[in-house]
Amino acid sequence: MSIKNIRLEVMQAIEPKVTGFMDSFLIPIDDIWQPSDFLPDSQSDNFLDDVEQIREESKELGYDFWVTMVADTITEEALPTYESWLMDVEGINQHTEEPSGWSKWVRAWTAEENRHGDVLNKFLYLSGRVNMREVEISTQYLLNDGFDIGTDRDPYKNFVYTSFQELATNISHKRVGQLARKKGNALLSKMCSIIAGDEMRHHLAYREFVKSIFEKDPNGMMLAYADMMKRKIVMPAHFLRESGEEKGLAFENFSICAQRLGVYTSQDYIDIFMKLNNYWNLETLRSLSDEAQKARDYLVGMPARLQRIAERMKLSEDQFRFKWVEANGML
């Protein structure tokens, strides 16, 4: 049987569990938070006063912080790209009279994620600290350029990616919230913290998907996991650019800002790698093929090798000027 057909059989075998995953890891639409729960009410007589408070509190946050906020927001707003990608994964099967469990999951996950970019974008606009037109240009570029995360249409590789990436975004949003709280910005801190909570729920779901696949096809899942980690998990906004730039340049410079702030670092990448290895119990899996055994050895040993590399790395102190954020004395 071909690899593709094995993948399809496994996806079909797991599909009956998807409804349970949705009940466990997603929140009904009528019960979940919405952006308007955190932002000033435009129908209120106090609206302008509330906006002025956001603008004043935002002045306490530094240049690297706003660069990181903008990049996080654009990443969240590129969600249409991510949904269209996942809907094309083999086994999702959206083109049926009755939507499949997998396609229902992707749509419900997308609906939850969509709120993140919405609330962050509105906050950026009200803060008065960023050039919104440049932000919007970068968002359009990112949607236009798409992305290539190295997964093709393989469900195994895509679920490894989302397991990793959802935890990475949880860490990033949580740390941005912590930084905002230290500067006295309680509203932004609360927003980022609740977004981080959504990302954690989604991470827990995707790592369960992979665990279920390991139970059905340990050899195939091990090889797919190893292939993804050899390629390295690239962030979904790795093509991020500003107006007049080549694709990906803004992402490279934003990554330096995020590392300087401690929002997301090479150490976080290593820690996520180790957590996934441990949760999927790689070292206890039995009856692997020779090829899968070699893949397991690679996966188990790689975090330590990455740790040695990370300890030798030096972070650039150069301050790149972004069109998104005017200096305004923040440098």
Image (cartoon, rainbow, N blue to C red):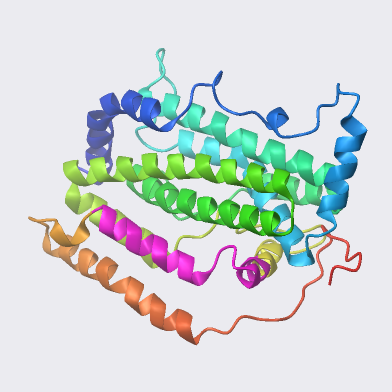
Q: Is residue 212 above or below residue 93?
A: below
Residue 55 located within the stretch drawn in magenta: no
**Prevalent SS, magenta region:** helix
* Res. 50 image quadrant: top right
Is 175 displayed left or right of 283 in the figure? right
Closer-to-camera residue (179/131): 179
Q: Is residue 133 visible?
A: no
Residue that protrudes farthest toward the bottom in the picture? 312
Residue 265 located within the stretch drawn in magenta: yes
Q: Measured from the top left, where is residue 141 in percent x and y? A: 73, 49
Is 308 displayed left or right of 217 in the figure? right
Q: Residue at x 28, y 66 (%)?
A: 299
Q: Residue at x 46, y 60 (%)?
A: 233
Is 267 displayed left or right of 238 in the figure? left
Q: Is residue 303 visible?
A: yes
* Res. 113 image quadrant: top right
In the rendered structure, which segment of residues is drawn in magenta? 255-280
Split into 4 quadrants, where in the image is the C terminus? bottom right
* Res. 51 image quadrant: top right
Closer-to-camera residue (211/42): 42
Q: Residue at x 74, y 54 (%)?
A: 184
Q: Measured from the top left, where is residue 191 in percent x and y? A: 65, 42
